[in-house]
Image (tube, rainbow, N blue to C red):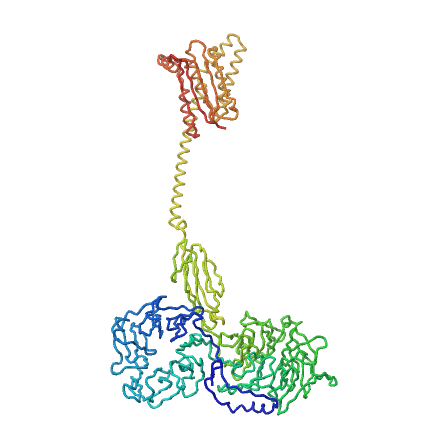
């Protein structure tokens, strides 16, 4: 009999064939036997509204081809990805919130059949109403009642739907409606459609009031069903061997043909579900009694499983990982990661849920809770037959005696029990209490002093050896001998016999070997052997020693070689509690689950590791001890005893599919596409993804990368990753999901990104800039060359004017007159004046030649040359005029510069054209004044004026013509152009009050040049 938790479904009598247990019970005079009916727990998780379901009333469950779980409820539908429920109702597009059935078609559309027969489907993240809803509802007119599992869609988009008491309808894509199998003039109730074969029921009120018929269309035979109370719920299911399962109210029929009908009754509990799984099991859900499983669909036998007693199981589906999902009408959805692991707890008769020790006589498993006065006994044979009982035994009639260790000696048919008070042996009806310990030689006797015992074994000579906190104990000839260490305190947790009556000992500080009464420490030979050892077993496959440690994983020792297996190699934990070797399989219990290590028979030094945890159906991850007998594995945990067939249970080898669920660009939700082409300023990307594996309830490892940034894989349990401010370029995002058993997705979820460069990085912009820059460079070079040419031309012209000014300053007339004046003084034998004149003339020539080589000269140099010139002209004209040169005190004539030969032409013009024609003494003044960084040079004479000078010039037919002022004016224009300066020349005619000319003033403005 089978139950979930503590809810008993049915009872069976205790099997009579527990002979050995009865034999033992007669031997134990203080035995207190408590028998409890066998029942089993299948570990599960219940999802309800508190977890996110829209309702606890769930009608249907499916897994789509992508791997998502879908649930139909009375308040919409829900999609589950292992992390979150995504709910959809009428606000999201459903035509009706009460959805009875979900169906996936050939396109991947998820169809929803509502209670009102209005159809809709989910496709590309949106819900759409079926385009022929109105036409179909107008056809059936009455309020519809959907026939279970009658909905389907073919590859031509024809929709099929059965309506209770109306028939089975085909609705074409264009909206044409036809009633199928119309040659039967009856309305259908429960029906099965397989290709074009129809199995249906004729309700009893159609033919008579006391009989029903099942009609199979392909050969038109009828099967008479026993009369039932009418009306009632009818369901139908086609078995894998073409048998028909038919239910009416609380009765289940298995119909092979009209002559072979098997009936199973469910105690007036109405059947609301018929389904089958990949293992050919038949699942029958009832309204009050939960769900039953008939192995291989054999309804003639008792159900193998009975789950969810008291609930109404509406649907069941086995997912791709082998987990079972059962929807209920009262408590949401149940998820069973495995139905192959059964758990026994205190509800089943165990003395306690925390089990630490297991032993066996080949038929009986003994287990005990730490520090409990009771033992537990389960028949292996009955477990195989599915009829086991759990009995609890108190072997010692002492409430203060606590059991530390147990061991059944198969060769001696004796049960050994080590307690806190004494050491006991049960054999042949005799109860032996060992309360005195002997030390060799036998003359040394001391009483039992409360040793804690950890493990007991029988050696090849028939002696019983015990590992304890007092060292090694040996039982021989009904005497217990203690082998304490004289040098140190030794706590022996585990022991394994070796050759020549020696033992390997697992101790608190490492590995010892007991040889000839001496302890040899192996921790000095290898540092790995210094770790605390909890269990030692020897493998006959490769003759190696397997050593379980607390913190250092598993050590494999062969000869002097020690190999270590750690969590990084596949173990669930580095803290191993117990080892059990069954041929080439090593079972290792740990604080994080159960490890299965399979040694390769082809290569004895290679192995594979599998891990089983609560996610696989274990009661707890705290596994304390493990045994394997006749393929059944017994696991002692902190939450009960787990039993399973070691050949049937496997880790989750289904690659988890992975999908990208949402994407944000610049923190804004975006539709998920295969690729994106984004502008340069849309480069902040957030990606959400999910790997669909339900055993670990969303605890999935992800590996991902973004090629273009980094080709290295990143690992995380987070379902979100963000990439802020990606530079322009091509990117490929890939993500894999990895389940707890290391199985990776077959293919990654991939998104491609192209982030365009900013316009200033585009080829056309670069080309435009290049051409623009090249054009500007060319234009600059062109302008520069042109400017250089122009400047050179101006300089050439300036040089020409300078030469002209120089020639003007050194014109032959001036030189001739100056030399005549010198000659005059020589002829007069006036050596002093001639020498003076000649010296000034020579000095003037030298200054003029020196200044003509410079573009700029100091004002002082210009004034020196000007003063010499005026003095020579004054001497030559017999001092006909007086002159003065005045310089502003603020003007530093040595610091500031002016172009050479600038003032002299205007002074010459004043002498020759103004003063030479004047009657009487002339006056010439040259004044330099500094004002706001401008030098003003004023040349004033009291000559005849420019008008009178022009008249005299016209009257002369042949005379010397001075072009100095014109040359200087043109030169100033060139200098202004070259140096970007504003040198100006202004002429002023001086007149008296009557308007008569009394002289000329020339004003030259010169910007300061340092």
Question: Is 866 rendered above or below residue 225?
Answer: above
Q: Give the x, y percent position of residue 210.
A: 31, 89
Q: Position of residue 997 (x, y in %)?
A: 39, 13
Q: Please count the marks in the image.
A: 0
**737 to 589, vertically: above or below:** above
Q: Is residue 464 left or right of residue 749?
A: right
**Residue projecting furthest to the right:** 443
Q: In screen coordinates, is 191 left or right of 898?
A: left
Q: Quadrant of residue 194?
A: bottom left
Return the x and y of residue 31 as percentages of the image width and height: 59, 88
Q: Is residue 430 above or below residue 49?
A: below
Q: Is residue 257 left or right of residue 325?
A: left
Q: Does the image show residue 855?
A: no
Above or below residue 889? Residue 208 is below
Residue 100 appears in the picture as rendered:
yes
Name the quadrant containing residue 173: bottom left
The x, y position of residue 940, in whole percent, is 44, 17
What residue occupies the far top of the structure in this picture?
828
Q: Nearer the viewer, residue 372 or 591?
A: 372
Q: Nearer the viewer, residue 415 or 726?
A: 415
Q: Foreground: 542 or 546?
A: 546
């Amino acid at each position: 009999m089978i139950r979930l938790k503590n809810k008993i479904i049915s009872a069976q009598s205790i099997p009579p064939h527990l002979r050995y247990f009865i034999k033992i019970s007669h031997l134990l005079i203080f035995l207190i036997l408590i028998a409890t009916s066998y029942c089993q727990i299948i570990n599960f998780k219940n999802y309800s509204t508190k977890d996110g379901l829209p309702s606890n009333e769930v009608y249907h469950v499916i897994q789509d081809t992508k791997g998502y779980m879908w649930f139909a409820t009375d308040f919409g539908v829900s999609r589950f990805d292992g992390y979150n429920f995504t709910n959809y109702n009428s606000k999201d597009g459903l035509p009706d919130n009460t959805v009875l059935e979900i169906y996936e078609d050939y396109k991947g559309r998820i169809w929803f059949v509502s209670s009102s027969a209005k159809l809709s489907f989910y496709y590309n993240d949106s819900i759409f109403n079926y385009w022929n809803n109105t036409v179909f509802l107008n056809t059936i007119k009455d309020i519809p009642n959907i026939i279970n599992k009658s909905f389907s869609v073919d590859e031509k988009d024809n929709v099929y739907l059965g309506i209770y008491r109306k028939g089975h309808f085909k609705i074409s894509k264009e909206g044409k409606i036809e009633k199928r199998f119309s040659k039967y003039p009856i309305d259908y109730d429960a029906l099965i459609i397989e290709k074009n074969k129809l199995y249906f029921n004729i309700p009893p009120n159609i033919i008579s009031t006391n009989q029903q018929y099942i009609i199979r269309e392909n050969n038109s035979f009828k099967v008479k069903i026993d009369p039932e109370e009418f009306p009632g719920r009818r369901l139908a299911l086609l078995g894998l061997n073409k048998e028909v399962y038919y239910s009416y109210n609380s009765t289940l029929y298995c119909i092979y043909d009209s002559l072979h009908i098997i009936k199973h009754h469910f105690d007036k509990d109405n059947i609301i579900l018929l389904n089958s799984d990949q293992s050919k099991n038949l699942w029958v859900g009832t309204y009050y009694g939960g769900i039953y499983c008939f192995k291989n669909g054999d309804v003639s036998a008792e159900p193998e499983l009975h789950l969810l007693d008291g609930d109404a199981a509406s649907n069941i589906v086995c997912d791709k990982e082998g987990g079972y999902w059962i929807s209920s009408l009262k408590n949401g959805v149940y998820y069973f990661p495995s139905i192959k692991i059964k758990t026994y707890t205190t509800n089943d008769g165990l003395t306690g849920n925390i089990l630490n020790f297991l032993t066996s006589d080949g038929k009986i498993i003994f287990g005990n809770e730490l520090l409990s006065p009771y033992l537990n006994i389960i028949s292996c044979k009955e477990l195989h037959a599915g009829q086991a009982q759990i009995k609890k035994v108190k072997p010692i009639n002492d409430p203060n005696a606590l059991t530390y260790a147990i061991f059944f000696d198969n060769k001696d048919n004796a049960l050994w029990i080590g307690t806190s008070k004494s050491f006991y042996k049960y054999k042949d009806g005799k109860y032996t209490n060992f309360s005195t310990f002997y030390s060799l030689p036998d003359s040394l006797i001391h009483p039992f002093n409360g040793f804690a015992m950890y493990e007991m074994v029988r050696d090849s000579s028939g002696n019983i050896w015990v590992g304890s906190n007092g060292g090694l104990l040996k039982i021989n000839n009904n005497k217990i001998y203690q082998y304490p260490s004289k040098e140190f305190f030794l706590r022996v947790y585990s022991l394994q016999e070796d050759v020549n009556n020696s033992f390997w000992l697992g101790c608190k500080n490492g590995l010892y070997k007991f040889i000839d009464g001496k302890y040899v420490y192996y921790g000095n030979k290898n540092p790995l052997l210094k770790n605390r050892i909890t269990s030692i077993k020897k493998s006959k496959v490769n003759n190696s020693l397997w050593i379980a440690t607390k913190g250092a994983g598993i050590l494999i020792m062969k000869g002097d070689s020690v190999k270590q297996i750690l969590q990084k190699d596949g173990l669930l934990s580095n803290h191993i509690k117990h080892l059990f070797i069954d041929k080439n399989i090593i079972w290792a219990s740990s604080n994080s689950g159960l490890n299965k290590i399979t040694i390769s028979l082809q290569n004895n030094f290679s192995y594979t590791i599998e891990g089983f945890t609560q996610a696989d159906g274990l009661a707890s991850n705290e596994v304390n001890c493990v045994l394997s007998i006749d393929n059944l594995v017994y696991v002692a945990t902190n939450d009960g005893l787990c039993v399973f067939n070691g050949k049937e249970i496997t880790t989750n080898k289904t690659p988890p599919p992975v999908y990208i669920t949402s994407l944000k660009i610049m923190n804004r939700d975006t539709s998920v596409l295969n690729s994106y082409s984004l502008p340069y300023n849309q480069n902040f990307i957030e990606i959400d993804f999910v790997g669909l594996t339900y055993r670990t309830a969303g605890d999935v490892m992800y590996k991902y990368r973004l090629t273009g940034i980094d080709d290295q894989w990143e690992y995380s349990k987070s379902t979100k990753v963000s990439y802020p401010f990606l530079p322009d370029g091509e990117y490929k995002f890939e993500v894999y999901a990895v389940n707890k058993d290391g199985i990776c997705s077959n293919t990654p979820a991939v998104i491609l990104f192209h982030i365009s460069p900013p316009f200033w990085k585009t080829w056309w912009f670069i080309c435009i800039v290049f051409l623009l820059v090249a054009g500007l460079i060319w234009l600059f070079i062109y302008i520069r060359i042109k400017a250089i040419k122009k400047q050179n031309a101006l300089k050439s012209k300036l040089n020409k004017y300078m030469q002209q000014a120089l020639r003007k300053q050194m014109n032959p007339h001036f030189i001739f007159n100056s030399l005549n004046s010198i000659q005059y003084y020589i002829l007069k034998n006036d050596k002093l004046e001639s020498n003076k004149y000649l010296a000034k003339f020579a000095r003037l020539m030298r200054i003029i030649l020196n200044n003509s080589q410079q573009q700029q000269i100091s004002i002082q140099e210009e004034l020196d040359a000007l003063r010499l010139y005026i003095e020579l002209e004054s001497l030559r004209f017999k001092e006909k005029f007086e002159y003065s040169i005045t310089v502003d005190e603020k003007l530093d004539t040595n610091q500031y510069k002016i172009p050479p030969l600038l003032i002299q032409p205007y002074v010459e013009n004043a002498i020759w054209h103004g003063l030479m024609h004047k009657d009487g003494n002339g006056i010439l003044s040259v004044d330099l004044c500094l004002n706001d960084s401008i030098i003003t040079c004023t040349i004033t004479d009291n000559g005849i004026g420019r008008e009178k000078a022009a008249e005299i010039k016209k009257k002369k037919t042949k005379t010397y013509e001075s072009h100095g002022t014109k040359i200087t004016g043109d030169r100033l224009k060139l200098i202004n152009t070259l140096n970007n300066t504003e040198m100006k020349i202004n002429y002023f005619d001086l007149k008296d009050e009557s308007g008569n000319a009394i002289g000329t003033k020339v004003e030259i403005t010169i910007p300061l040049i340092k």
